[in-house]
Image: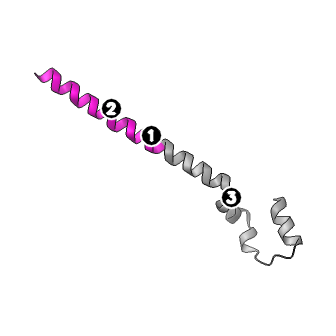
Amino acid sequence: MSDAVDQLLAGSTDHHSLRPDVRKLSHPLFTQTYRTAERRDNLSRTRLTRARGRLANVKKQNAR
């Protein structure tokens, strides 16, 4: 918030980029949060794939 006020006081005329929703998207913490969620989803997908593989191996061994 103070960054936006500082930019306005400095004479910035790009009001669209100072809107809270637009600034949030360009803020580093937003990107970090997005990347954290992306890594969590990828890890979940990897764990599920590995669990399915282990289950398939157990079924093969039991079928013998």
Q: Residue at x 33, y 32 (%)?
A: 51
Q: Is residue 64 above or below residue 24?
A: above
Q: Position of residue 53 (x, y in %)?
A: 27, 33
How crowded pointer 2 is (Cα within 10 Å; few <14, some 14-19, many 20+) is rated as few
What amino acid is found at the position of numbered circle 3 in the picture?
Answer: His
Q: Residue at x 61, y 54 (%)?
A: 31
Alpha-carbon span between mark 3 and mark 2: 37 Å
33 left or right, relative to 40: right
Counting residues from the start of the chain, the first of labels 3 and 2 encountered is 3
Q: Which residue is mark 3?
A: 27
Report the span colored magenta.
41-64
Is label 1 in a helix, a strand or a loop?
A: helix
Q: Is residue 12 above or below residue 6?
A: below
Quick one: quadrant of the N terminus? Answer: bottom right
Alpha-carbon span between mark 2 and mark 1: 12 Å
Q: Position of residue 29 (x, y in %)?
A: 67, 52
Q: Is residue 58 magenta?
A: yes
Spot the residue most to the bottom: 13
**Magenta segment main secondary structure:** helix
What amino acid is found at the position of numbered circle 2 in the picture?
Answer: Ala
How crowded pointer 3 is (Cα within 10 Å; few <14, some 14-19, many 20+) is rated as few
What amino acid is found at the position of numbered circle 1 in the picture?
Answer: Leu
Alpha-carbon span between mark 3 and mark 1: 25 Å
Residue 2 occupies quadrant: bottom right
- How many numbered marks appear? 3
Is label 2 in a helix, a strand or a loop?
A: helix
Q: Is residue 55 magenta?
A: yes
Q: Which residue is mark 1?
A: 43
Counting residues from the start of the chain, the first of labels 2 and 1 encountered is 1
Q: Position of residue 32 (x, y in %)?
A: 61, 50
